[in-house]
Image (spheres, rainbow, N blue to C red):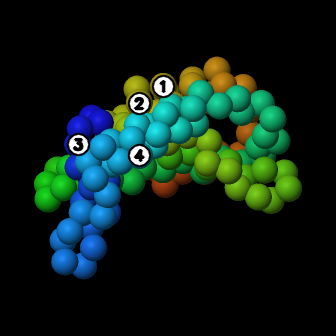
């Protein structure tokens, strides 16, 4: 995945003439740092957040340039008692399946998230089943 991620970052860092703005080793370093930050985000302790509501949904992105096949990304936002919002989880998922959402919720619980008062979804059957 990191190789294709490097190509994606490289594509994003081109000027209007198509020239790459950074050398390949700088792009690789940037990619490695972004991946490390994502891994740290996925392990962050959530017990410090006073989450009242969560909003769960998936969006679909092409993970490779110029490809029409899109992958699901399962996203969970938390609304805190203060009214501010925080991104709690962002993980690849298989078309919002029950198993993938259940894994997301188990991970949130393992990372210390307290049970919210309300959970909101768009009605995807796998997500509703995982909520229950």
Q: Earlier in the sequence, mark 2 or mark 3?
A: 3
Q: How many marks?
A: 4
Query: Quick check: can you spot residue 131?
Result: no
83 or 34, which lies in front?
34
Q: Earlier in the sequence, mark 1 or mark 3?
A: 3
Quarter of the image for residue 96 reads: top left
Q: Earlier in the sequence, mark 1 or mark 4?
A: 4
Query: Residue 44: where, in percent of width, then height?
Result: 65, 31
* Circle on res. 16: none
How many residues crowd mark 3 within 10 Å: few (<14), some (14–19), many (20+)?
few
Query: Residue 49: where, in percent of width, then height?
Result: 78, 40
Mark in front: 1 vs 4: 4
- Residue position marked by numbered label 2 in the rendering: 100
Mark in front: 4 vs 2: 4
Badge 1 marks a residue whose secondary structure is: helix
Above-or-below relation of 58 to 42? below
| Pointers 2 and 1 in contact (C-beta within 8 Å) | yes
Query: Quick check: can you spot residue 87?
Result: yes
Above-or-below relation of 45 to 29? above
* Quarter of the image where the C terminus is located: top right
| Pointers 1 and 4 in contact (C-beta within 8 Å) | no
Badge 4 marks a residue whose secondary structure is: helix
- Residue position marked by numbered label 4 in the rendering: 30
* Circle on res. 4: 3
Q: Earlier in the sequence, mark 3 or mark 4?
A: 3
Label 1 to label 3: alpha-carbon separation: 25 Å
* Circle on res. 103: 1
How many residues crowd mark 2 within 10 Å: few (<14), some (14–19), many (20+)?
some
Query: Residue 87: where, in percent of width, then height?
Result: 61, 48
Residue at horizontal 39 percent and vertical 54 percent from the top: 59
């Amino acid at each position: 995945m990191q190789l294709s991620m490097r190509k994606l970052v490289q594509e994003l860092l081109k000027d209007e003439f198509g020239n790459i703005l950074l050398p390949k080793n700088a792009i690789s370093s940037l990619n490695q740092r972004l991946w490390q930050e994502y891994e740290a985000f996925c392990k962050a302790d959530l017990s410090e957040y006073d989450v009242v509501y969560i909003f769960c949904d998936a969006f679909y992105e092409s993970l490779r340039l110029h490809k029409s096949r899109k992958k699901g990304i399962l996203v969970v936002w938390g609304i805190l008692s203060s009214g501010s919002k925080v991104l709690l989880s962002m993980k690849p998922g298989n078309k919002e399946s029950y198993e993938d959402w259940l894994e997301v919720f188990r991970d949130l619980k393992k990372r210390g998230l307290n049970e919210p008062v309300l959970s909101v979804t768009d009605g995807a059957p796998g997500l509703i089943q995982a909520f229950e």
